[in-house]
């Protein structure tokens, strides 16, 4: 998920504009304004924000950034930026361009903005409000990569009366998974019940929307994985995001507005780099852009190597690869007795394959990865998110082979966590990976001999 803190740097320039915060009305009508344009704009940038959670303040700042970009003339005259936000308050759609900013619609009641049918309906309305020749999409909220949000805990036939086990099982059920989080309470709490989306739901929405995207930007944590990018490769020419936890600052919308409107991928990353190099409390984190037309060639080259090195046992070099998450499946209680379950390990794809392949194999394979991920931001030795402690998974352990995209490796413990001879928790991450992601087959895992009966010997 995004790290949550205020964007103090924005306050001065926004205050100097004097009163621009009132540009958006509080109209309570179901459809307050809007309409079709005679001539389509060159581009519409769709921003879909799910901020009915502890990121509500961060969303409000990002919306003020977009408003400032509009008032400052940073949005080109042939581009519309249209924003849906569901935070604390009524969901709304607001249009921003070089001429104006206005509320197009405000709902009278709450809705679950992480429900795929709602997402599809809203995106269709946004497209109708702001028709264009080209479209791009920003998905903004909490994120946790490819792993699922569905209930993945099962009881064995024996009774699990131990309070420790029951708390762990409850926490697994409530874990944040994949993208988005609407707490359905219309407040800024990090409540443990609410709506979330799996990547299969995102794919369904984009297929039904039937609008090809020049790029999909994940303004969320952990979403830049090979599994996610390959699954959505037909929906967007580029997929942009971070393989690790991202700052709540997120995208620098003021300075990135023109690049976002121009679908200037290199310019978008440059705006990120320039912005984070000027921050005192946070620093540049891993970030990259995937060119989806190159993913099939990468898959074709990767699959036989996965079969060669990952059939049966974990390769020795795995322990030295760059990771973006804890290596252990930690289950521990905080001072209040609340348990935290960490998801599957996120390996840097370039680093992991370098540690596993021979030098000759890596020299042949790496250029294909670089074609698929031609733009990446390389952090310094370690990166800081809101003055939090630096650990090995926000430290650049393998800078020479860093790629800016994460990769999953199935492991036995990702399906079952055994507590004793008669009780266990069932996560189902391997089974879900196999069932829900095309990368299971395209990336070679289907031919490794790993199956559900053995539940992954590695």
Image: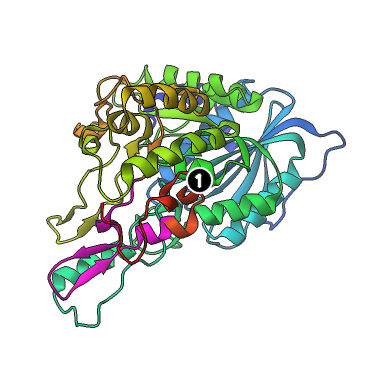
- x and y percentages locating residue 93 in the rendered image: 63, 47
Is 277 left, or right, of 133 in this rendering?
left
**Magenta span has 429?**
yes
Q: Depth check: give the residue in front, 169 or 458.
A: 458
Q: Is any atom of residue 173 visible in this view?
A: yes
The residues colored magenta run 409-433
Residue ID for mark 1: 442
**Residues packed near mark 1 inside 10 Å, few (<14), some (14 to 19) or many (20 plus):** many
Q: Residue at x 18, y 70 (%)?
A: 165
Residue 216: x and y, percent?
Answer: 57, 37
Residue at position x 36%, y 41% in the image: 308
**Image spot of residue 154 (x, y percent):** 30, 73
Name the side, left or right, on which 171 lies relative to 251. left
Q: Please identify the quadrant where the N terminus is shown.
A: top left
Q: Position of residue 367 (x, y in %)?
A: 47, 22
Q: How many marks?
A: 1
Element carrying mark 1: helix
Q: Quadrant of residue 294?
A: top right
Nearer to us in this view, 404 or 265? 404
Q: Is residue 90 left or right of residue 81?
A: left
Q: Is residue 156 above or below residue 127?
A: below
Say which residue appears at 72% left-offset and 45% top-offset. 127
Q: Residue at x 43, y 33 (%)?
A: 250
Q: Is residue 27 visible in this depiction of the protein?
A: no
Magenta run includes residue 191: no
């Amino acid at each position: 998920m995004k790290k949550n803190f205020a964007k103090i740097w924005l306050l001065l320039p926004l205050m100097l504009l004097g009163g621009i915060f009132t540009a958006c009305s509080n109209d309570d009508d179901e459809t307050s304004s809007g309409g079709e344009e005679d001539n389509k704009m060159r581009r519409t940038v769709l921003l879909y924000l799910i901020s009915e959670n502890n990121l509500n303040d961060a969303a409000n700042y990002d919306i003020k950034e977009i408003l400032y970009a509009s008032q400052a003339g940073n949005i080109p005259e042939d581009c519309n930026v249209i924003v849906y936000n569901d935070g604390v308050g009524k969901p709304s759609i607001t249009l921003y361009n070089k001429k104006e900013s206005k509320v197009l619609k405000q709902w009278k009641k709450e809705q679950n903005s992480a429900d795929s049918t709602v997402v599809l309906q809203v995106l269709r309305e946004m497209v109708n409000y702001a028709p264009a020749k080209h479209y791009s999409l920003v998905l903004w909220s909490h994120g946790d990569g490819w792993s699922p949000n569905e209930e993945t805990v099962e009881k064995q036939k024996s009774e699990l009366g131990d309070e420790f086990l029951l708390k762990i099982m409850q926490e697994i059920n409530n874990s944040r998974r994949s993208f988005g989080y609407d707490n359905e309470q219309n407040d800024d709490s990090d409540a443990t019940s609410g709506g979330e989306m799996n990547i299969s739901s995102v794919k369904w929405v984009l297929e039904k929307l039937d609008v090809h995207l020049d790029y999909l930007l994940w303004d969320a944590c952990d979403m830049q994985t090979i599994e996610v990018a390959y699954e959505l490769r037909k929906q967007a020419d580029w997929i942009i995001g971070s393989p690790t936890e991202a700052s709540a600052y997120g995208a620098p919308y003021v300075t990135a507005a023109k690049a976002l409107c121009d679908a200037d991928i290199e310019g978008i990353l440059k705006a990120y780099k320039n912005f984070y190099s000027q921050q005192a409390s946070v620093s540049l984190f891993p970030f990259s852009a995937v060119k989806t037309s190159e993913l099939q060639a990468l898959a074709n080259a990767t699959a036989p190597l996965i079969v060669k090195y990952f059939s049966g046992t974990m390769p020795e070099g795995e322990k030295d690869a760059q990771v973006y998450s804890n290596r252990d499946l930690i289950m521990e209680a905080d001072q209040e007795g609340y348990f935290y379950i960490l998801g599957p390990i996120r390996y840097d794809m370039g680093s992991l394959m370098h540690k596993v392949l021979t030098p000759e194999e890596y020299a042949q394979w790496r250029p294909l990865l670089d074609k698929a991920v031609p733009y990446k931001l390389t952090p310094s030795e370690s990166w800081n998110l809101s003055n939090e402690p630096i650990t090995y998974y926000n430290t650049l352990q393998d800078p020479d082979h860093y790629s800016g995209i994460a990769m999953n490796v199935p492991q036995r413990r990702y399906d079952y966590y055994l507590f004793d001879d008669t009780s266990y928790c069932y996560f189902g991450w391997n089974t879900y990976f196999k069932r829900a992601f095309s990368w299971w087959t395209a990336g070679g895992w289907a031919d490794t001999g790993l199956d559900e009966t053995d539940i992954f010997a590695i």
